[in-house]
């Protein structure tokens, strides 16, 4: 019975926690500029993140190590400092974008400029991390995040042609703006498969004391949670494609993205959009911050854990506080949150091979996962997609920046 | 045993199972006419940083000096204190009393003042 409750909670919170600043902005832009055509990118990225999440949980449940800890042990600091440094850099950028996204959501609700909300939101993120244990953070934010299902409701309400949706699941080349199309495909991948998510997932498995016997729970939670979560992202794209696209509204700010809810939710449109954006971003900000604390402490062998009394893990507290302070500082300086998001996402894809390839080596090492090593399909698919996506990102980012 | 694979970078825990850190460096003793042997393990961010680059190592040890947490660091654990080596290294010391916990103790002075720290 407890296992069933854990399973349902796990799936539900994964759905609630799936959508955040990156997925909303990329899917909204993709929908408004290319209709349903980039739906395949969300589907592919979702399958990829589900596979990676399942593997992260499996590694942690069998080896009792998170990815950061296992990479340090297996590859040593000479290898680890580059991917770890890159991951922390992206965590900071992403955090700034998430805090910015949450601040814009509050602005949409109150009308008061978003810069005023950045510090209070940063403080609130810290307070949640200071006061709450892992389960409360994970389940509380995940359940609140179910408000993002309003994207699915709106897409459903707009009655898209099912055969059009099915056709969009097969990759095709666009009629116009090839560079922009490739850039958005790369950004969707970066928004879905964030490096922080993998270490966060493996650390969460340890926090929840999942064992080898519960690997099936991990598998079901990862695949069902992520796949249903992907449906929420698709809801954003479909809504944007059906509402913003025909009206030639392109998403160059979150305020414009909020318009996508008007035909379905009318006077509730802005409130629902703001709540979805705000809760999604706030939840992700908490997770990114926590993961930075996890990754630092695990790599250096310090005591860590959201369930530990904070005075017994002060370096862990200091690590996440420092990263949060950096992220908030960048957000305060006042970069355009949407632009910051897009940069962080594209960079994510560039560093992805550095994170995913060593992780795949661990997943094939019986010292860590015993008899639960990866199959050839998982290995091959992830290695090939990761490398190809990184190469594509290296080509399209400069083109997009120059063009933009 | 392969020192780099099985010992270096592995987790170090004290006799009560509490994390001390990781094996950031291994001290070898060179002997005339005999193979080198392990003299001690070292734990501390400065030695770890100096493995990445000597300049980085100096920056980290300089920062430790500025914050007044450099006394006795890095922690050197004599080979005789190693109790067990499995997937981690268990050593016969108490984590809280070593200089490896100096930063933890330094931060605790601040963290303990915030309500809800324990």
Image: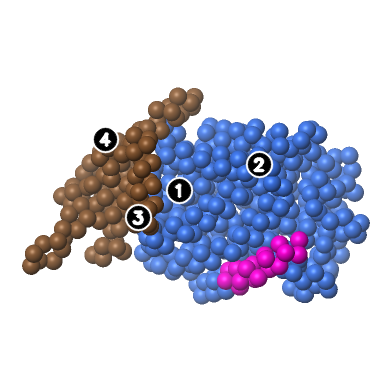
- Report in which chain the residue with disc 2 lies: A
Q: Colour of chain A?
A: blue
Marks 1 and 2 belong to one chain: yes
Callout 2–callout 4 Cβ contact below 8 Å: no
Q: Which mark is residue A296?
A: 1
- Label 4 and label 1: CA atoms lie apart by 23 Å
Q: Say if the magenta span includes residue A401.
A: yes
Q: Position of residue A113 (x, y in %)?
A: 76, 35
Q: Colour of chain B?
A: brown
Name the residue located 65 percent from the left edge and 39 percent from the top edge.
A332
Of marks 3 and 4, the one in the foreground? 3
Which residue position holds label 3? B54
Marks 2 and 4 belong to one chain: no
Q: Which mark is residue B97?
A: 4
Picture layout, residue A178 above or below residue A328 = below
- Report in which chain the residue with disc 1 lies: A
- Label 2 and label 4: CA atoms lie apart by 42 Å
Name the residue located 59 percent from the left edge and 64 percent from the top edge.
A350
Q: Mark 1 falls on what kind of element?
A: helix
The quadrant the C terminus of chain A occupies is bottom right
Q: Which mark is residue A333?
A: 2
């Amino acid at each position: 019975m407890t296992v069933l409750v854990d399973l349902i909670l796990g799936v539900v919170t994964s759905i609630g926690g799936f959508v955040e600043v990156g997925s909303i902005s990329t899917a909204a832009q993709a929908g408004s500029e290319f209709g349903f055509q980039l739906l395949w990118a969300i589907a592919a990225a979702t399958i990829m993140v589900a596979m990676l999440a399942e593997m992260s949980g499996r590694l942690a449940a069998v080896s009792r190590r998170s990815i950061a800890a296992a990479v340090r042990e297996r590859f040593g600091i000479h290898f680890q400092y580059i991917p770890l440094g890159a991951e922390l850099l992206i965590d900071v950028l992403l955090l700034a974008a998430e805090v910015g996204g949450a601040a814009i959501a509050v602005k949409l609700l109150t009308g008061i400029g978003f810069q005023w909300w950045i510090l209070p939101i940063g403080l609130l993120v810290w307070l949640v991390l200071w006061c709450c244990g892992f389960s409360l953070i994970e389940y509380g934010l995940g359940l609140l995040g179910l408000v993002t299902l309003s994207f699915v409701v709106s897409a459903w309400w707009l009655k898209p042609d099912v055969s059009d949706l099915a056709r969009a699941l097969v990759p095709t080349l666009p009629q116009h703006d090839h560079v922009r199309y490739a850039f958005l495909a790369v950004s969707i991948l970066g928004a879905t498969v964030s490096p922080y998510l993998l270490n966060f997932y493996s650390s969460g498995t340890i926090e929840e004391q999942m064992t080898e016997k519960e690997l099936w729970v991990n598998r079901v939670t990862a695949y069902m949670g992520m796949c249903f979560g992907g449906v929420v992202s698709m809801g954003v794209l479909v809504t944007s494609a059906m509402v913003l696209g025909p009206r030639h509204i392109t998403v160059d700010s979150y305020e414009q993205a909020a318009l996508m809810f008007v035909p379905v939710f009318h006077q509730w449109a802005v409130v629902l959009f703001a709540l979805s954006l705000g809760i999604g971003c706030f939840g992700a900000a908490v997770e990114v911050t926590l993961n930075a604390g996890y990754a630092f402490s695990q790599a250096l062998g310090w005591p860590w854990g959201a369930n530990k009394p904070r005075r017994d893990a002060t370096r862990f507290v200091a690590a996440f506080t420092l990263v949060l302070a950096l992220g908030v500082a960048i957000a305060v300086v006042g970069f355009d949150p949407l632009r910051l998001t897009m940069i962080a996402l594209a960079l994510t894809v560039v560093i992805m091979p550095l994170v995913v390839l060593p992780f795949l080596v661990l997943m094939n090492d019986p010292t860590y996962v015993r008899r639960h090593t990866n199959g050839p399909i998982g290995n091959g698919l992830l290695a090939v997609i990761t490398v190809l996506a990184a190469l594509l990102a290296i080509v399209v980012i400069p083109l997009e920046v120059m063009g933009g | 045993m392969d020192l780099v694979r099985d010992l270096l970078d592995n987790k170090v825990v004290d006799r009560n199972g509490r994390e001390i850190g990781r094996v950031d460096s291994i001290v070898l003793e060179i002997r005339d006419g005999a193979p080198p042997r392990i003299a001690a393990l070292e734990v501390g961010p400065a030695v770890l940083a100096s493995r990445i680059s000597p300049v980085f190592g100096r920056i980290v040890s300089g920062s430790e000096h500025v914050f007044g947490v450099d006394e006795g660091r890095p922690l050197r654990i004599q080979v005789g204190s190693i109790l067990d080596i499995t997937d981690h290294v268990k050593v016969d010391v108490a984590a809280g009393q070593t200089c490896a916990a100096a930063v933890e103790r330094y931060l605790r002075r601040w963290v303990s003042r915030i309500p809800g720290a324990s």
